[in-house]
Amino acid sequence: MTDLRQSTGIPELDTLLAGGLLPGKLTVVLGATGIGKTQLGLQFAQAGLQQEGQTGVLFDMATRGDSQSHSDYAERLFQWKLREQLVETAFDLDQIWDAGTRTDYQHLFRQSGRRVTRRDMELDEWKEWKLEFVKKLDAAIAFFYSNFVHGVRRAVIDGIEPTDRPSDSFQFHAFEYVYHQILRKEYDWVARDLFRAQFRSHQAQVEQHQYDFQQIGCLLLLTTHEVMLDDLIQRPIESGDVLSNANTIILMGKIREGNRMSRALHIAKHRGSAVDESLVPYEIQESGLKLLT
């Protein structure tokens, strides 16, 4: 594997991906609830410790208060105790430069308990969603920026619910902003969005903590209605869909083997690399995902 690739934390999957994932690009992992997406995301985040010297961060966009079990999985798999940055707690901008205050988990819409598509909401409710997101944007910017300036190069985004039309989903609107206006933006412009009127007083430290956004890998874990891998493979991609812009797409679903069901994954897209297009069975073990190659 070349130094330009980011390991998924699963050697067999890295091999299928011609060495790993490309930093500066979007990878989307699709599959139904309980198929193993979160474990894969955590293995990718944890692999950053060895490769970049820092674990990745987890950004949870679940809206109904349901636990994604990130903390439980992280501690069981890696003895990794996630440190949460609460959205409701004001972020001390002067602490950003202190690596000891770094957190690695944020739940943006904790316990909001609402649906996320326009068809489920009146116009006023949709406007309230947007207003709520705007209020929480500063916390999200501070969370990512305070990690990137200290060497974090991996972001895992989880909790997006399945919808028939992604364009109707508030979560997709929020993701598009986070991805394009934070993860894929020059460090100094992210700092300007964060510090605003205080930017000049922090400018020297901003320059001392430069980072290259093109070295940041993003793994989006997308929950689907489809359970069977065959259905995921046949799933159409709409123009403008987040999948059409992804560099890599990994599908995870159930397959039927005789009279039993098992899990398998398929790499549906991996721009710039030759990949193995087979259906690869895997198991969820105590140590995480294990490919049965």
Image: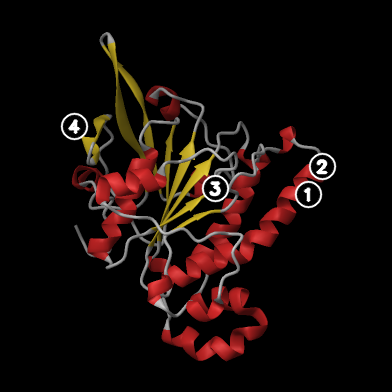
Mark 1 or mark 3, which has the lower sequence index?
3
**Label pair 1/3, CB-CB below 8 angstroms:** no
Mark 3 or mark 4, which has the lower sequence index?
3
Q: Name the residue that disc number 4 marks.
A: 292
**Label pair 2/3, CB-CB below 8 angstroms:** no
Which callout, 2 or 3, points to the residue nearer the camera? 3
The CA distance from mark 2 to mark 1 is 6 Å
Identity, as a three-letter code, of the amino acid under mark 1: Lys
Identity, as a three-letter code, of the amino acid under mark 2: Leu
Mark 4 or mark 1, which has the lower sequence index?
1
**Label pair 2/1, CB-CB below 8 angstroms:** yes
Q: Name the residue that disc number 3 marks.
A: 61
Q: Name the residue that disc number 2 marks.
A: 123
State the image quarter where residue 77 is shown: top left
Left or right of 228, for residue 139:
right
In the rendering, at what x and y percent does residue 255 appear?
32, 20
Mark 2 or mark 3, which has the lower sequence index?
3
Crowd class of label 3 (few under 14; some 14 to 19; many from 20; radius 10 Å): many
The CA distance from mark 1 to mark 3 is 18 Å
Q: Secondary structure at mark 2?
A: helix
Q: Which mark is residue 240?
A: none
Identity, as a three-letter code, of the amino acid under mark 4: Leu
The CA distance from mark 4 to mark 1 is 47 Å
Q: Residue at x 25, y 31 (%)?
A: 282
